[in-house]
Image: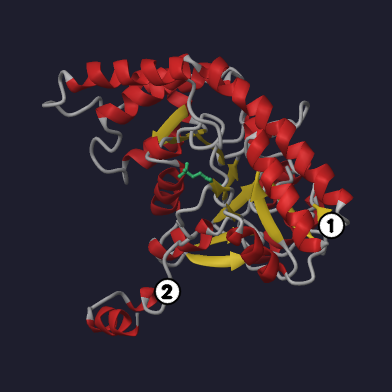
Amino acid sequence: MNEQLDRLSRLPLRDDLRGQHPYGAPQLDVPILLNVNENTHDVPDEVREAIVKAVDEAVTGINRYPDREFTELRQALADYLGHGLRAENLWAANGSNEVLQQILQAFGGPGRTAMGFPPTYSMYPLLASGTGTAYLKGVRADDYDLTAESAAAQVREQAPNIVFLCSPNNPTGTALGLDVIEAVYEAGEAQQAIVIVDEAYAEFAHAGTPSALSLLPGRERLLVSRTMSKAFALAGARVGYLAAAPEVADALRLVRLPYHLSAITQATALAALRHSSQLLANVEDIKVQRDRIVEGLRALGLTPSPSDSNFVFFGGLQDSHRIWEGLLEAGVLVRDVGIPGHLRVTAGTEAETTAFLDRLGELLA
Ligand SMILES: *Cc1c(COP(=O)(O)O)cnc(C)c1O
């Protein structure tokens, strides 16, 4: 490893990338993977067959570049989201991570700042650093709550060019009230801040949790990003998207690579969207397991945060590293997000969830 670092340091790497570490959730070969919030359910056979057929058709014509504007996909995404959105309001890329990167390329960069509220998605500072954007860390209350007053005051004080609001938040799992988003948007008025609401887990929220999509009309600096990696069980296909004013897509066209969404990706996403009801049926199943985890953890005397996502963040552990290792020995991989006494677990299938809760109970006994 040191030799590898030595060799890296001899390269003419950008100064601001020296000493940085890549994104690195462990990819271990373990039977029960509950560490990166993937959808733990396989794609249903019927959907699988539809995707294979669509990909097969896309291969006819693979000698040509794909539709650069992915028009059909943008229309299908608009239809899926509703809220009166049209194709021109939608944009997509290879995972919402690429969407976020394009936003930073277009609206961030050297001399500009992006702000997040840790603990939050660990990719925000990495994407900022990759695009030469300075990253500002906001603060949350001790219980990880973020109120409208606090968030707005911090945005007024630090005046970032870009604000990341993750709702439901990763790793804590809790959704933000729309009042927080409205207040942050207004607080960013002076410097015309771009406000990104990352709704990667929106489909897992409890019924009645409002989406920031309802705030889009009249707010041209508000961007709502979503992904097909979680609810649609398509993490391997790499499809993320955003909804915003049409001029936001015009800005992202300036930085995207030509033909960035392959014909295979577009065909896969379209086939999955045509089967959204089957895929979202699994989401209901996962929500049941998520609620079961929250109850199970409480019964063990632990302190799970309220979750509107497909994972649960919990504290109350005396030695979280010992528990993480004990779970791993039993073939259950969860996430240590670096907060002492806490771990994060993805809601699995019923059997996986049982294995996690049983083993955790044994370790705590
Ligand atoms: C998983 C996740 C994403 C999704 O990333 P993709 O690139 O679409 O796979 C985005 N934001 C958050 C907060 C996530 O946890």
> Which residue: 19% across, 22% down?
59
In the image, residue 40 above or below residue 360: above
Determine whether, in the image, residue 256 is placed left or right of residue 318: left
Ligand 1 closer than 8 Å to the CB at disc 2?
no
| Label 2 crowd bin: few (<14), some (14–19), many (20+), radius 10 Å | few
Determine which of the numbered discs, if any, sits on residue 333 in the image: none
Determine whether, in the image, residue 109 is placed left or right of residue 10: right
Q: Which residue is mark 1?
A: 302
**In the rendered view of the protein, which quadrant contains the N terminus?**
bottom left
- Which element type, helix, strand or loop, lies under badge 1? loop
Residue closer to the observer: 90 or 17: 17
Q: Amino acid at mark 1?
A: Leu
Q: Amino acid at mark 2?
A: Gln
Residue closer to the observer: 20 or 163: 20
- Which element type, helix, strand or loop, lies under badge 2? loop
> Which residue: 63% across, 28% down?
283
Determine whether, in the image, residue 104 is placed left or right of residue 169: left
* Residue 112 position within the rendered picture, expressed as x and y whole percent measured from the top left: 48, 63
* Residue 150 position within the rendered picture, expressed as x and y whole percent measured from the top left: 79, 58
Determine which of the numbered discs, if any, sits on residue 20 in the image: 2
Q: How many marks?
A: 2
